[in-house]
Structures are given as structure tokens and as C-alpha cells.
Image (spheres, rainbow, N blue to C red):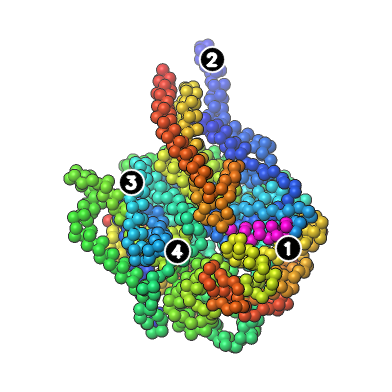
């Protein structure tokens, strides 16, 4: 039991950090343009595939650096030539543009790498067991993922709060006109932030690719969860995204290990339901079965009760 | 005295003509729906026209939310699907109990189910607008889609729920077995729904929805509650989506979880947006186009999804008014009879961009052949011509087409826009004079 | 008024696409078979493999003279893994004059097509079509929802479990069994069959876990693996396929889980790669009607030629049986009409692709054939073929004759008079 809790906590924190890598970029982009980037998970997927392709030629470590840079450049180009043109048509148009972009990126990835999973391996340097908790081995690669995620978070926080560039970015997010009047090139700042956000997602892809299956449907699997995190954490708040990512990561990991259902709960009060009644179908559902759905429940609850999210400052 | 008598005698005729001019188009539409199957008789065309009818109602209901009230929803298929499920269960129950309820009444049950769920979910979602509303709709859609695997009794699990429309009570000896009868049923409901939705857009309520879309804050100043307006619009949209779902259930006789899924919601969003959300006719055009492409495009190419996505992006970037928006620009020109002036520059532009487009398609298809289908060899057929993807010359021709077509398009674009603005000015001048 | 004009324009525009619908010319000299499966999107990798398999066998039959002097032609239709879309594609096939439809990926799609076949054939006498199911394994299709026009060549999931449990009867080292499956109809069927059959045949086996996880949504199976470990199981029975199988095995390898895996679809696309990556040598077993390394000359020659052409292994040996039986039925019936072919198909016996007797049972149109249990790992001289270029291959552990896999059916078929 304790083993299960420990392992689940570790895995939950790990999954949460991975989600945070992506959600942080998404939050930054949202703060900047007021539009949720549907294609954000697609950049995560691009990062994984670029990482795979580059690691086949020069190895994993160069890929860790080069792939996110490439994806960042792609993201910046998308912002410069795509999103900027659509901006004048309104928020709906921007959202739909990213929606269509997600579609197209998935198709192009399928065209180049096929529809089957690709053989993206853990680098041999990290392919060992880090430690053993009771009887379960914890792979070193997962620790590496954790370390990289935390490291990037610290770097991001430092850059945003302690450097001049970070100052300009933060100012542009809330007062773009004023910053422009002070002589900074605000559109260039936006392009930079978009590229940075995409690069963050790509880093998540490069390191998650070997652990999870690298396949062209990766984006569709993680995409909706990202929105849930950003909304729950609070639109526009990076610390909020951090808390929400950890929360969702832990909830999802713990929920799948819980086999209890409402029937069990009712049973503790000494009541039983006729197994064939439709209500019984509903209460027989275990927590593990609805584990992937819990984030959406939270999403609806938060949006109804506290639309600014847990730490957010803006509503839309 | 005689003047008064004369005008009183003239009024009935004039108002009759005016009424015909206002509503005559519906008559034309009805005749068109009636006459189409007589011209196109193949089974596939009948099925396709039935699907177009269903999609028209669905897309129009969606546009009540998006175009009229400014609410972007990613989960509209929930009401479509739930309407379909209720209709299919109702049909099975009616068949079992042998009640004398005819099949044509069933979409109403679907509409009621859609309305009921729209009331439940709408009370929660419509408190917010904009992105928050979109996210709630996404969350709700995911919830319903996931619960479809849990509540197996209602959703029928993987296989869904089936029914048999020929076993229902027969009115006038119609058993609705043949597809043509189903087509007429769908066409009838489609016409009724179109008229109803059109009429709704012209009520004061419809105008209030537009006001909420434009400036939700200001509508509170005149005493209307924006939440109430959004809520009612949401419920009505759910009602018509449920009708569309009921028609789909009758058409396919099988309903499963994909009816409520995100993909279905995405398709109706695509259809409404490509058609044009700013005009009533937009979703109709979009529904027809998207249904046609869905059915026919996958026969022509395997990467139809890529073309879909690119088309969608192109519309979002270059023609946010959609097809209807593009057509509407030319309506004053038709009335001022200056449309013919546009023909030459438009024809040139069309030719140039077609050349570029063909070149781009060839490149994409060649790339697809070389990458994904590498094991099937490099030979392929495109536009009726056999090509070898590994040899150089198809690539060179394609690049030449793209380059040449691109340059031509750039050259042809300014004259076309100039001709358009000239013609528009001339039309406005003609109107004023 | 602006809108009525628009209505007129749009009505005219709407005629354009309808005009462009092409009805393909009816080629009189080929016998066409519609292949309806996903050819785009997520399921396309499987659908494409199917097309190639069908094409290959059609070529083989054509080389021997075809059927009734005509050549077989496979016409692919993309159903995007959607049941409604499949019905539209079936309609298109019927319009094009095709009377034989085959499909396999997705029991929900198969159920929709089977249902449509029954209704359409009843309402349109003279235009009947056959539905040949090569891979949809939901048992209900040959039990409660059976119909005369549906024939299935894949052993359904209950039959596979019957074969598997018959094998487990002879393997006393299995003491604690863990069930983990995807939460949808197939996974539920596997789990239900496993529980019933094991309690009848090996009541001493303790089922220490029964897990249902959401289909294709889990990205990290570590918590599930932790539960399996905690239960002390020595064997796991799972129907997982695709990424659910690959990720499960990866997580198990990461955690150092040492169990035997009894699976249905370890040999599916991506499975062998996942097993090799996890380094699990000869502990993953699969129950299937055919593997490349079965010591039968004819099938191994066939496999060699197939791999040389397509660079992938033959995943669907049952398709060979299906096509050969179809050709034989058409030749025997001397007709291309569905009712006559169906009458010859049911009850037909053949010598199956991998050697042994197989027959199509009349009561429920389910094909019974020998089943094999094989394990995946390092090859020896007896295993000439590897899978997915991993170097590892399937080693045959045991074979169960068709008679050893039979199950009763609840089918009450409506036969046309």
C-alpha cells in the first residue's frame, strides 16, 4: 500500500511536471494574445518527432538542444505569418486558426513519419534503474525527466523575474501599448514569446517521447488536458499552471489505482442496489474507470464556480 | 373619392406580389427539394442528399449560437447525439408497445431531448461568454463522450443502439424502407427547420442575440439580461440540433457514441465556418460542401484530411466571412447589373490560382507517395495521368506549375480587386441615383 | 431583399457538387470486392496492411485463372473508422455494382454493417450483398446479433479464450492470474470469458486482479503495473492492443515486473517492437490462428513471397482462408449472386492456410480452425522469420485443433426462403 502511494506520488509529480512544461508555454501565449492555442500539443508532438529524427543521426543529447530550437523557430514563423494576419479578424478566428493548424500539423507528421509508432529509444546513458522502492524499480530516465522539468521551471522563473528581457515580456503581456511607446518592438516580443512557448512544449516532447509512445496521435491525447490545466490554474497565471499541472498529474495517477466505486460507499452504509437497475450502472463505476474524465469534471466545476481559475487574474 | 376606391382596389394585388417576392424563395426551395431526386437517381446521391439535409439543420442550429449570438461551442454535437439516442430508444419502445405514432413525428422527440439537455447544460454554461464558454462546452463534450462507455445501457456500448424504421406505424402506407422516402422526410423537416430558424433571426429576440454578440455589456444597459438571451438561444439551438440528430437516427438506423463526440462537433464547426457565419445561407452552403467533400474526397485521395485542414486555414485567414461572405459581396453587383465587368479579371485569377493549386496538389501527392506509401512503389495516377514519384520530371513540372501559377496569381490579383472595387462603386452609384 | 437572392444562388450552387458525383463504370469482366476499413487517420496503418493482404491473395487467385473466368478486384473504401461513414461507403459500393463487402477493423463498424446488410437485403431483393468479416471479434456478431449474410473468419474472442484456457489446463505453473483489459465491449468480453472458463477448467487458479482501464487514454501504465506487482500475480491475461499494449509492456519492463503475458494482439502492429524494446524474452504469449514460423511448407513459402513484396509480415493468415473459400464458393455456385454464394459458403470445409482442417459452421457462420499459442523472443533455427525487423520471432508452443476450440452459439438465424 505504502509502495503504491510512493510510486504513484513520484509518477504523479513527474507527469505533472511534464504537463507543466507544456502548460507554462500555453499560459504565456494566452496571456499575450488572449487566445488559447489549440495547436500547442501539436508543437509538443513536433518536438518528439524532431527529437526522434535528430537523435537517429547525432544522438539524444544534441537532439535535446536542437529539436526545441527548431520547433521554436517554426512557432515563431507561424506567429509572424499566420497568427498575426488572423489577429484582426477577432478572437474566434484566431482560435479557429490554431484549430485548423493542429489538424494540418498532425496530417503532415503522418505523411512524413507514418501512422505507426516510431522507435524512439531512451539514451543508453540513462537506461538503468535509479533506485528501488520496496520491490518496484524506478527508472533513471524518469528521474532525468523530473530534473529537466524542474530545472526549466527555475530557469523560466529566473528569466521572467530577474532579467531585463523578462521584464519587457511581462510588461508587454499586460501593457503592450505602453511598452511600444517606450520604444520596444512589441510584435517582435510577441513572436519571441510564441516561439518560446512552442520550444517549451517541444522540450516536453523530446524528453517524453522515449517514455511514452511517439505516434502521430500524441497531440490529440494530451491536447484537451492542457486546456483543463490552464483554465483550472487560472488564465494568465504561470504559478497557477504549475499548481494545476501537479494537481491534475497527481489526481490522474492516484485515481487509476483506486478501485472503489459509489456502490462500495453505499455498501458501507449497509445498502445495496439491484444490480440491473440503471442507477446501479452509474454507481458501479469505479474511480479508476472515470480517472481520465475527472479533469473535465474539475474544468466544468471551476468554470462555473470560479471562472478566473484558482490563481487567475482574467476571465477570458 | 375615386382615388380612394382605386387605391383600395390596388392594395390586395400589390401586397400579394410583395408577399410572393418575400417568401417566394421558400417555394423555390421546396420545389427544388421535391425535384432533385427526380433528376439524380443513384443510391449514393440520394444518401448524400439526405446527409446534406441533416447537416443543413445541424449547421443552422450551430450558427444560431456562433453567428447569431457569438457563442463558440466545441460541444454542440452533444445535443445532436443525445437527440439521436432518445429517438432511437423511443422508436424501439414504440415498436415494442405497438403505439400508433408515425415515423415523421420522431424528430420532434429528438428536438425535445436536445432542448431538455440544452436547458440543463445551458444553465451552467451560458453564465459566461467567450473563451470560458468554449472551454465549458469542450469539457462537457468530453464528459458526455466518456460517459458513453460507462453507461452501456443507454449508449449501447461499442455497437451502439439499432432500430428498424420499417416496423413503425405506417401513415398512408409509407414504410420508409426505401431511401427515397427517407429523403423526402428529411427534406420536409429540413425545410420546416430552415423556415423556423430564419423566422427566429428576424424576431426581436434574434436581434437581441446579435446585440449580445456585438457588445454584451451594453445590452444590460437597455434592461436585457445577456445571460437570459444566451440561455434561450442555447436552448433553441439545442432543440434544432436534436431534430437533426433524430433525422440522422432515422437515416442510419444505428446510433453510437461517435454522434456525441468531439469529431462531430468539429465537423459542424467546420461546415458553419466555411459556409460563412455572418449570413443565414452560410451554414447551408457549408453543410452542402462539407458533406460532399466528406463523402467524395476520400475516394480521390488518402490525405483528404490535410486538404480539409488547409482549406479551413485558408478560409480563416483569407475569407473569414466564408463562402457566403464572398458571395454576398457580389449581390449588389448583380442587382446593378455590373457583374459581367468582373468576369474577365476573375477568370484570369481563377485560371492562375488553379494552375498554382494543381501544382501544389501534385507536390503534396508525390511527397505522400514517397514517404508513406514507399513500399507500394513509386508509380501512381493523378488527374488521370500515370506518374512515377521517383523520377525528376513530375517534380519539376509541379514546381514550375506552382511558380508560374503563383506569379500569375500575384499579377492577376490587383486587377481583380480593382475591378471589384470599381464595380462596387458603380453599383453603389447606381443605387443612389 | 438580399437573402432570397442568396438562396437562389446557393440553390444553384448546390446542384454543382451533386452533378459531379461520378458513378464508376460497371466493369463486367472483374469480380469486385469492396474493402471498407480506415485508410486515413489513426487507424490507417492497419487498414493499409489489410488492403495489401487482400490484393496479394487476389493476385494469387487471378494468376490461377480467377473465379468463373473473371479476375478478382479489390476496391478500397475509406470508412475513417466511423460506423455511419461505413454505411455510406457500403451504399457507394452497392451503387457501383459490388455485391461482396469485407471489413474487419472495429466491432462497432462490423455491427453496423451487419445490421445494414440484414435490413438492406430484406428491402431490396435482387440486390443482396454479402458481408465477410475478417477481424471484428465481438462474439455478439455470431450469437445474439447474427444474421444470414454475415460470415466471420476470425476466431471470436470467446473462442480464443476457450483455446487459451484449454491450454492453461495443461500448464500447472499458473497459480495467480491478473486480468487487465480495455474498458469497452471487446475487453469486457475477454474478461467475462476468462472468468467463466477458468472457474470451470482450472478452479485452482486464483484471479488476483481484474482491471478495466479506459481505451487508448492511458499514457502511463506505471500505477497499473504497481498494482499487478502488489497482487503477486505470476501471469497476466490481457486483450490490450496498439498503444495500450505497448505502454503496458514498457511500464512493466521499467518496473522490473516478471510475469507471463497471455495476449490476443501482441503480434499486432507495434506489438513486436514494444516487446523487443522491453526486453521481455519468451514471456509474451499470443493466441492466434497463424504465425509465420508455423512449420508448414506452403504457408512459409507464401510468407516469404509476401514479405519480399511488402516488407511486412502476414498479419492476417485468416484472410487467405477467407478469399480461398470465397473463390471456391463462387466456382461451386457458378454464380455471383449473394444468396447462392452464401448457400455454398456455410458449411464449407477447407484445408486452412497453415495446415489443418477448418470449416464454416452453418448455425452461426463462424469459421473454426486450428489455433496456435506462440511466444515471442530470440529465434532459433526452427524460426526463420522475425517480426518488424526486431530480430526476434514467434516460437510455436502448442497447437489446438479446431475441434478443441468449439463453443455453442445462441444464434437464431433468419434464413431467406
Mark number, residue C324:
1
Would residue C347 appear left or right of B204 to someone viewing this image?
right
> In the structure shown, which secondary structural element does the residue marked by tag 3 occupy?
helix
Q: Which mark is residue C153?
A: none
* Quadrant into which the C terminus of chain B falls: top left
Label 2 lies in what chain? Answer: B
Report if the CB atoms under discs 4 and 3 are less than 8 Å apart.
no
Contact between marks 4 and 1 (CB within 8 A): the answer is no
Q: Tell me residue B346's x, y (percent).
A: 47, 29
Q: Of helix, strand and loop, which one carries label 2?
A: helix
Q: Residue beneath label 4, please?
A: A214
The residue indicated by pointer 3 is: A80
Residue under mark 1: which chain is it in? C
Q: Of circles 3 and 1, which is in front?
A: 1
The residue under label 2 is B5
Magenta region, residue range: C47-63
Marks 3/1 same chain: no
Front label number (4 vs 2)? 4
Q: Front-most of B73 and C233?
A: C233
The Cα–Cα distance between marks 4 and 2, rounded to whole angstroms, is 84 Å
Secondary structure that dominates the magenta span:
helix
User: What is the spatial separation of the Cα atoms under label 4 and label 1, in whole angstroms?
Assistant: 38 Å
Amino acid at each position: 500500500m505504502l509502495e503504491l502511494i510512493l510510486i504513484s506520488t513520484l509518477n504523479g509529480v513527474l507527469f505533472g511536471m511534464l504537463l507543466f512544461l507544456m502548460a507554462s508555454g500555453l499560459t504565456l501565449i494566452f496571456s499575450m494574445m488572449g487566445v488559447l492555442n489549440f495547436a500547442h500539443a501539436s508543437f509538443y508532438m513536433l518536438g518528439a518527432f524532431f527529437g526522434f529524427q535528430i537523435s537517429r543521426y547525432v544522438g539524444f543529447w544534441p537532439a535535446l538542444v536542437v529539436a526545441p530550437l527548431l520547433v521554436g523557430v517554426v512557432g515563431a514563423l507561424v506567429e509572424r505569418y499566420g497568427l498575426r494576419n488572423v489577429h484582426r479578424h477577432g478572437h474566434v478566428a484566431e482560435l479557429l486558426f490554431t484549430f485548423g493548424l493542429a489538424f494540418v500539423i498532425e496530417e503532415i507528421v503522418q505523411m512524413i513519419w507514418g501512422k505507426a509508432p516510431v522507435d524512439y529509444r531512451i539514451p543508453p546513458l540513462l537506461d538503468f534503474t535509479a533506485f528501488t522502492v520496496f520491490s518496484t524499480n524506478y527508472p533513471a530516465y524518469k528521474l532525468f525527466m523530473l530534473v529537466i522539468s524542474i530545472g526549466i521551471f527555475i530557469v523560466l522563473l529566473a528569466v521572467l523575474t530577474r532579467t531585463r528581457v523578462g521584464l519587457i515580456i511581462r510588461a508587454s503581456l499586460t501593457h503592450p501599448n505602453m511598452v511600444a511607446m517606450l520604444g520596444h518592438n512589441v510584435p517582435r516580443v510577441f513572436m519571441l514569446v510564441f516561439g518560446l512557448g512552442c520550444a517549451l512544449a517541444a522540450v516536453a516532447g523530446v524528453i517524453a517521447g522515449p517514455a511514452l509512445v511517439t505516434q502521430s496521435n500524441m497531440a490529440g491525447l494530451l491536447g484537451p488536458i492542457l486546456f483543463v490545466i490552464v483554465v483550472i490554474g487560472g488564465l494568465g497565471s504561470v504559478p497557477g499552471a504549475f499548481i494545476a499541472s501537479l494537481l491534475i498529474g497527481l489526481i490522474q495517477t492516484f485515481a487509476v489505482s483506486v478501485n472503489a466505486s459509489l456502490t462500495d460507499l453505499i455498501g458501507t452504509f449497509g445498502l445495496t442496489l439491484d444490480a440491473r437497475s440503471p442507477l446501479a450502472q452509474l454507481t458501479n463505476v469505479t474511480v479508476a474507470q472515470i480517472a481520465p474524465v475527472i479533469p473535465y469534471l474539475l474544468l466544468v466545476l471551476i468554470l462555473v464556480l470560479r471562472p478566473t481559475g484558482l490563481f487567475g487574474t482574467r476571465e477570458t | 373619392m375615386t382615388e380612394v376606391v382605386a387605391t383600395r382596389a390596388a392594395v390586395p394585388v400589390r401586397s400579394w406580389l410583395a408577399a410572393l417576392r418575400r417568401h417566394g424563395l421558400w417555394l423555390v426551395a421546396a420545389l427544388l427539394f421535391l425535384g432533385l431526386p427526380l433528376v439524380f437517381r443513384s443510391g449514393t446521391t440520394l444518401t448524400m442528399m439526405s446527409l446534406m439535409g441533416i447537416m443543413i439543420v445541424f449547421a443552422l442550429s450551430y450558427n444560431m449560437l456562433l453567428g447569431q449570438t457569438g457563442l463558440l461551442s466545441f460541444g454542440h454535437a452533444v445535443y445532436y447525439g443525445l437527440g439521436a439516442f432518445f429517438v432511437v430508444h423511443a422508436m424501439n419502445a414504440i415498436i415494442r408497445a405497438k403505439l400508433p405514432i408515425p415515423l415523421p413525428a420522431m424528430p420532434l422527440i429528438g428536438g425535445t431531448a436536445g432542448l431538455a439537455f440544452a436547458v440543463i447544460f445551458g444553465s451552467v454554461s451560458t453564465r459566461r461568454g467567450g473563451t470560458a464558454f468554449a472551454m465549458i462546452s469542450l469539457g462537457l463534450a468530453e464528459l458526455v463522450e466518456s460517459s458513453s462507455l460507462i453507461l452501456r445501457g443507454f449508449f449501447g456500448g461499442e455497437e451502439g443502439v439499432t432500430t428498424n424504421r420499417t416496423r413503425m406505424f405506417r401513415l398512408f402506407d409509407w414504410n420508409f424502407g426505401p431511401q427515397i422516402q427517407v429523403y423526402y422526410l428529411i427534406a420536409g423537416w429540413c425545410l420546416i427547420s430552415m423556415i423556423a430558424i430564419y423566422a427566429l433571426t428576424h424576431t426581436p429576440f434574434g436581434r437581441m442575440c446579435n446585440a449580445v454578440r456585438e457588445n454584451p455589456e451594453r445590452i444590460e444597459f437597455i434592461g436585457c439580461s445577456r445571460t437570459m438571451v444566451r440561455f434561450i438561444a442555447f436552448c433553441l439551438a439545442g432543440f434544432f440540433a436534436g431534430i437533426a440528430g433524430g433525422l440522422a437516427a432515422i437515416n442510419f438506423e444505428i446510433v453510437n457514441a461517435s454522434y456525441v463526440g468531439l469529431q462531430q462537433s468539429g465537423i459542424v464547426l467546420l461546415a458553419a465556418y466555411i459556409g460563412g457565419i455572418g449570413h443565414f445561407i452560410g451554414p447551408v452552403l457549408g453543410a452542402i460542401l462539407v458533406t460532399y467533400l466528406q463523402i467524395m474526397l476520400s475516394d480521390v485521395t488518402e490525405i483528404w484530411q490535410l486538404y480539409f485542414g488547409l482549406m479551413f486555414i485558408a478560409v480563416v485567414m483569407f475569407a473569414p466571412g466564408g463562402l457566403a461572405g464572398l458571395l454576398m459581396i457580389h449581390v449588389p453587383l448583380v442587382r446593378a447589373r455590373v457583374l459581367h465587368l468582373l468576369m474577365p479579371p476573375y477568370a484570369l485569377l481563377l485560371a492562375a490560382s488553379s494552375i498554382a493549386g494543381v501544382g501544389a496538389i501534385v507536390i503534396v501527392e508525390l511527397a505522400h507517395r514517397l514517404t508513406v506509401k514507399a513500399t507500394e512503389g513509386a508509380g501512381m495516377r493523378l488527374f488521370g495521368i500515370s506518374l512515377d514519384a521517383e523520377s525528376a520530371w513530375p517534380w519539376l513540372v509541379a514546381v514550375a506549375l506552382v511558380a508560374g501559377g503563383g506569379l500569375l496569381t500575384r499579377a492577376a490579383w490587383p486587377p481583380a480587386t480593382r475591378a471589384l472595387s470599381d464595380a462596387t462603386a458603380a453599383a453603389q452609384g447606381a443605387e443612389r441615383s | 431583399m438580399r437573402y432570397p437572392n442568396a438562396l437562389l444562388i446557393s440553390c444553384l450552387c448546390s446542384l454543382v457538387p451533386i452533378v459531379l458525383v461520378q458513378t464508376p463504370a460497371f466493369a463486367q469482366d472483374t469480380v469486385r470486392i469492396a474493402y471498407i476499413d480506415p485508410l486515413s487517420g489513426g487507424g490507417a496503418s492497419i487498414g493499409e496492411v489489410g488492403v495489401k493482404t487482400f490484393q496479394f491473395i487476389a493476385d494469387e487467385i487471378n494468376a490461377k485463372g480467377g473465379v468463373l473466368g473473371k479476375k478478382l478486384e479489390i476496391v478500397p473504401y475509406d470508412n475513417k473508422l466511423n460506423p455511419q461513414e461505413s454505411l455510406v461507403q457500403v451504399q457507394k459500393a452497392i451503387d457501383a455494382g459490388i455485391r461482396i463487402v469485407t471489413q474487419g477493423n472495429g466491432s462497432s463498424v462490423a455491427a453496423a454493417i451487419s445490421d445494414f446488410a440484414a435490413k438492406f437485403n430484406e428491402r431490396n431483393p435482387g440486390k443482396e450483398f454479402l458481408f465477410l468479416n475478417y477481424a471484428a471479434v465481438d462474439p455478439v456478431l455470431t450469437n445474439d446479433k447474427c444474421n444470414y449474410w454475415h460470415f466471420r473468419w476470425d476466431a471470436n474472442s470467446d473462442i480464443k479464450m476457450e483455446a487459451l484456457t484449454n491450454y492453461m489446463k495443461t500448464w500447472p505453473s499458473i497459480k495467480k492470474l491478473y486480468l487487465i483489459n480495455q474498458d469497452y465491449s471487446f475487453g469486457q468480453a475477454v474478461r467475462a470469458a476468462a472468468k467463466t472458463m477458468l472457474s470451470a477448467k482450472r478452479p485452482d487458479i486464483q484471479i488476483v486482479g481484474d482491471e478495466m482501464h479506459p481505451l487508448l487514454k492511458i499514457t502511463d501504465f506505471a500505477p497499473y503495473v504497481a498494482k499487478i506487482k502488489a497482487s503477486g500475480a505470476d501471469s497476466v491475461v490481457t486483450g490490450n492492443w496498439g498503444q495500450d499494449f505497448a505502454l503496458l509492456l514498457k511500464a512493466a519492463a521499467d518496473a522490473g515486473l516478471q510475469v507471463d503475458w497471455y495476449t490476443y494482439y501482441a503480434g499486432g502492429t507495434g506489438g513486436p517492437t514494444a516487446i523487443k524494446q522491453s526486453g521481455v524474452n519468451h514471456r509474451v504469449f499470443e493466441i492466434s490462428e497463424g504465425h509465420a514460423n508455423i512449420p508448414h511448407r506452403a504457408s512459409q513459402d507464401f510468407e516469404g513471397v509476401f514479405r519480399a513484396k511488402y516488407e511486412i509480415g502476414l498479419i492476417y493468415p485468416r484472410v487467405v482462408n477467407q478469399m480461398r473459400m470465397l473463390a471456391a464458393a463462387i466456382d461451386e455456385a457458378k454464380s455471383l449472386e449473394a444468396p447462392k454464394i452464401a448457400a455454398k459458403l456455410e458449411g464449407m470445409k477447407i484445408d486452412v492456410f497453415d495446415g489443418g482442417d477448418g470449416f464454416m459452421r452453418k448455425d452461426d457462420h463462424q469459421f473454426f480452425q486450428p489455433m496456435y499459442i506462440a511466444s515471442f523472443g530470440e529465434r532459433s533455427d526452427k524460426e526463420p522469420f522475425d517480426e518488424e525487423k526486431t530480430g526476434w520471432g514467434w516460437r510455436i508452443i502448442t497447437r489446438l485443433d479446431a475441434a478443441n476450440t468449439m463453443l455453442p452459439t445462441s444464434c437464431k438465424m433468419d434464413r431467406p426462403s
